[in-house]
Every structure is written in C-alpha cells, then in structure tokens.
C-alpha cells in the first residue's frame, strides 16, 4: 500500500508542478495583456465620445483605441493646482483627471478639462496662451477658462482646438507630461 501512496504523491506533485509552471505562464500572459489594455473610466467615456464626434464635425479623425483615461490624484507639492494630466505609459497616452475637482465641476468645466487633456494626448497640442480681444483664443490655455467663458466661446474654442491658430504649436516629442491647472498661482 505504501508503494501506491508513493505513486499517488508523485503524480500529485507532478500535477502541482504543472499547474504552478502553467500558472506562472498564465500570470505572465495576463500581465502582458493588461499592459496593452486601454481603459476609459465610464464617467469619462461620454466626454471622450463627444470629443470624437466634435473631431469628425471639424473634419478630423481621432483614434481613442489606445487611450487610457482614469481618475486619480493629479496635484503634488510642486503643482498643487493641477487638475488634469496627460502622460504616457509604455508609449500609450494616459489621461488622469483629479477626483476632487471632478466632484465639484459643472458640465462645462468637465468638458473643458477633458477636451484640453485630449488635445494634449490625442491631438498632440501644447499649451497656447494667445489672446484675441483680451479673451483666450484656445482651450489649450494652461489654466481653466471657467464655465462662463467656455460656454460663451465654445464654438470658437473647439474650432481652434481642431484647427490651431498661428502661434500655437504641437508638443515636442521629448515632453514628459503636460497638465492643466485650476487657476494661476
């Protein structure tokens, strides 16, 4: 009988070893696939789709398939007023929206922030501080324009977002990340 137990133990150990080695392979495959997954938080998806529709209306094609958009903490000791960031992870665009700001923002402030960050990450736009008649000519200002100004000038701001005016440039390829501030310091 001990011979039979010994055989059963060997078989069980062999099966366990197979599961463990296959498990590690499975974990590696899952990890690899997760790095390639792109995710847009459900609370941001509607605005991402709205951005895509606006792009089409402005005769631009945008691809959001490699984009990740999430909520998180965007501020730091050095940048306490940052409410949105655009960066890269493994060469893919990642937008982070500040949770604290989002919870208090109205629909126009939310759209302005998301469209601004998509301007960086998807359109490759840098900040633009050009004024026309004393008003910001671009949604790509580094500071929030605010609900009233955004709502009143939305059409012009979106026209400029998708067809930049002279003097507003693309992001340099070596940039580490760009962000939007709630207001000037």
Image (tube, rainbow, N blue to C red):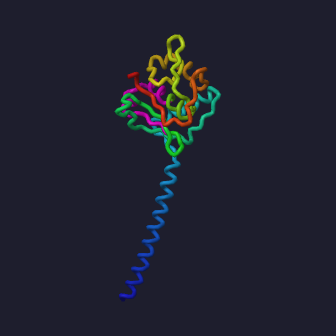
Is 113 magenta? The answer is yes
Closer to us: 134 or 169:
169
In the image, residue 147 lies at what x, y percent? 44, 20
Q: Residue at x 50, y 28 (%)?
A: 116
Q: Residue furthest right?
A: 59
**Can you say which quadrant of the picture contains the N terminus?**
bottom left
Residue found 44% across the figure and 67% down from its top: 20
Return the x and y of residue 59 as percentages of the image width and height: 65, 28
- Which quarter of the figure has residue 83? top left
Q: Residue at x 51, y 44 (%)?
A: 38
Measuring from the top left, give residue 14's x and y in whole percent. Answer: 44, 75
| Principal secondary structure, stretch drawn in magenta | helix
Instruction: Name the residue nearer the viewer: 134 or 49.
Output: 134
- Residue 8 percent across, percent down from the top left: 41, 81
Write down the region rendered in magenta. 94-114
Q: Is residue 185 magenta?
A: no
Residue 184 shown left or right of residue 46 in the figure: left
Give the position of the C terminus as an image quadrant: top left
Query: Given the current orientation, which residue lies at the most extreme top position?
Result: 133
Q: Is residue 112 above or below residue 65?
A: above
Total marks shown come to: 0
Residue at 39 percent of width and 84 percent of height: 6
């Amino acid at each position: 009988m001990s011979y039979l137990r010994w055989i059963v133990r060997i078989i069980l150990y062999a099966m366990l070893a197979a599961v463990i080695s296959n498990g590690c392979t499975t974990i590696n495959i899952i990890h690899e696939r997760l790095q390639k997954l792109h995710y847009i938080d459900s609370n941001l998806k509607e605005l991402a789709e709205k951005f895509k529709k606006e792009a089409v209306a402005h005769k631009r094609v945008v691809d959001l398939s490699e984009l990740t958009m999430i909520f998180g903490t965007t501020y730091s000791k050095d940048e306490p007023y940052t409410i949105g960031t655009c960066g890269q992870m493994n060469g893919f665009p990642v937008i982070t929206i500040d949770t604290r700001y989002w919870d208090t923002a109205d629909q126009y402030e939310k759209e302005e922030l998301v469209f601004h960050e998509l301007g960086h990450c998807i359109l490759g736009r840098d900040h633009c501080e050009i004024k026309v008649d004393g008003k910001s000519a671009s949604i790509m200002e580094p500071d929030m324009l605010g609900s009233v100004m955004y709502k009143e000038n939305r059409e012009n701001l979106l026209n400029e977002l998708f067809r930049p005016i002279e003097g507003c440039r693309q992001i340099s390829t070596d940039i580490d990340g760009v962000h939007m501030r709630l207001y000037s310091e």
